Image: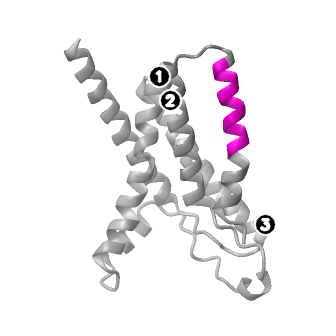
Amino acid sequence: MLDYEFFYIISTPIYIFFLIVFIWKKIKVEKIILTSIFYFYIISLLTVTIFPIPIQGLNEVWIYAWDNNNYIPFLSILDILINDNLWTIIKIKQIVGNIVLFLPMGFFIPLIWKSKDYFKKALLIGLWFSFCIELLQYIISLILWFNYKVTDIDDILLNTLGFIIGFFLYKLFQKSLENKN
């Protein structure tokens, strides 16, 4: 099993390299702190969505069905909501969890990169990143020859909604700072 610890081990030297570059370029401390928080958020996001990757015992799980993937918008959301067999906490985790997962990204992107302060530009980044995660899950499933994570269009929709909420929270935060000044 390729677990998230592996990813943290790889990401730490990369972070140190970028930290050295930021210090060498004399980037403001506030910007380094914000970028560092965002970096660790992205690493955590990837560990939650991509890992663990099962790399041993593939013969035992090859029979796992490919039909769990969802390419029809709102199908899995509706299925979760009307399924009486699911506990409410699982429903909340599935739907709200996907929204909350991308909320920080919607906040941090325009905060760190002022050129991404415009909704369209920021939205495209959030949508693209969510799509890339789902695509990566699908590609890893193809490589492993079984569906280790479900690829779901509704995850992209919910992640993008979370991004949009985060973006508007940033705008509220920005307005409150302007009102104080």
> Which amino acid, mark 1?
Glu
Q: Is residue 152 above or below residue 24?
A: below
**Magenta part, dominant SS:** helix
Cα distance between the residues tagged 1 and 3: 41 Å
10 Å neighbourhood of mark 3: few (<14), some, or many (≥20)?
few
Q: Residue 83 or 22: which is nearer the viewer?
A: 22
How far from the left and from the top, in percent, is residue 149? 60, 69
For the residues bearing labels 1 and 2, Cβ distance under 8 angstroms: yes
- Kindly identify which numbered label has been placed on residue 143: 3
Task: Give, as a three-letter code, the residue at label 3.
Answer: Ile
Compared across the picture, whether 124 is left or right of 21 comes to left
**Disc on the earlier residue, 1 or 3:** 1
Could you tell me which quadrant the N terminus lies in?
bottom right
N-terminal of the pair, mark 2 or mark 3, is 2
At x 48%, y 31%, the residue is 109
Bounds of the magenta segment: 12-23
Where, quadrant-wise, is the C terminus in this rendering? top left
- The residue indicated by pointer 2 is 33
- Comparing 155 with 110, the one in front is 110
Classify residue 146 by image quadrant.
bottom right
Residue 59 placement, left or right of 148: right
Does 109 lie within the magenta span?
A: no
Q: CA distance from mark 2 to mark 3?
A: 37 Å
Magenta stretch encompasses residue 22: yes
Labels 1, 3: front one: 1
Residue at left offset 31%, top offset 35%: 169
